Image (cartoon, rainbow, N blue to C red):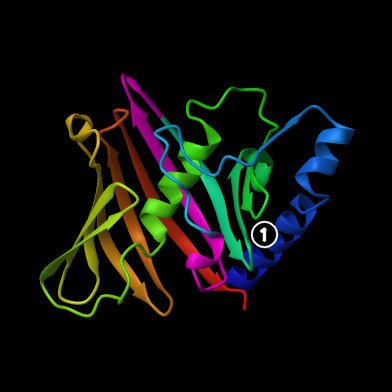
Amino acid sequence: MAKLGAYSSLGLLLSGCLGPSPSEREMASGSSQASSRASDDAGVSLLPVDDLRANLLMRQHVTVKWADREESFDAVLQKRGGVLLLLGLGPMNTVGFKLTLDRDGVSFENFSGRELPFRPERILADVQRVFYPWIEGGWDCVECERRAILDGLEVREQIGARFLAERSFRLLARPERGRIVVRYEGWTSDPPVPIRATLDNGWYGYELTIVTTGIERID
């Protein structure tokens, strides 16, 4: 019952954050930024929202480390239909920021009064690097490695006894930048979602740890 109550509260929170389209919000207020440039600041294209087939609501705790700084916050990640939504939460589940990816591109709203340390597109790109499928065919091998080239991006995956253990990304045109490496610790089975993922972004020099504390299907 406590879990149901928590998700009911999250449902109300998400419902309150859904509103008019980004263009309509921009007309009404200068607090929104929208862009049709669906790529991060390395020029890597974001995947279509529907590449993640399951419709999910996930409660998460996120820790970011860069230079000599470290920050943590709670978040809600929802993929529903053609919309990927990330909410950064503050005290009492207040919304600190809202990030959306849909067919019109990326939109961002910041309610915290603080500047985010990273561009919105980069945040969504990291979300997709952790949670989205990148190589077709599923994890149909055991204790093996898979590799694919996608628009100049080399993707490697290490498959464990059952689930994905590690995934890395390298720009073929810029190998000197190193790799982005995602390491996984524990998975739920239905739906398959990583319980803990650590992303080491060698391109920009920061570490992102995402602990998923709750998952709900919203089909």
Q: x, y (%) of residue 100?
A: 63, 48
> In the rendered view, would you say 30 is above or below 36?
above
Residue 214 x/y as whole percent? 49, 64
Q: Quadrant of residue 11?
A: bottom right
Residue at x 37% of width, y 52% of height: 129
Q: Residue furthest left?
A: 143
Residue found at the very far right of the displayed protein: 28
Residue 110 horizontal side relative to residue 175, left or right = right
Badge 1 crowding class, 10 Å Cα cut-off, few under 14, some 14 to 19, many 20 or more, is some
Of 68 and 27, which appears nearest the observer?
27
Q: Position of residue 26 (x, y in %)?
A: 81, 35
Question: Is 61 inside the magenta-drawn segment?
Answer: yes
Q: Secondary structure at mark 1?
A: helix
Tell me which corner region of the image, top left, top right, bottom left or bottom right, holds residue 37.
Answer: top right
Given the current orientation, which residue lies at the most extreme top position? 68
Residue at 21 percent of width and 77 percent of height: 162
Exactly how many numbered labels are in the figure? 1
Q: Which residue is mark 1?
A: 10
Q: Residue at x 48, y 66 (%)?
A: 51
Looking at the image, which is closer to me, 187 or 48? 48
Q: Is residue 33 magenta?
A: no
Q: Quadrant of the N terminus?
A: bottom right
Compared to residue 115, the image places residue 203 above or below, namely below
- Residue at point 13% right, 77% down? 142
Q: Quarter holding the C terminus?
A: bottom right
Residue type at the position of mark 1: Leu
Range of magenta residues: 49-70
Residue 44's spot in the image, x, y percent?
A: 41, 42
User: Compared with residue 217, is residue 151 higher up or lower down, i.e. above or below?
Assistant: above
| Residue 89, quarter of picture | top right
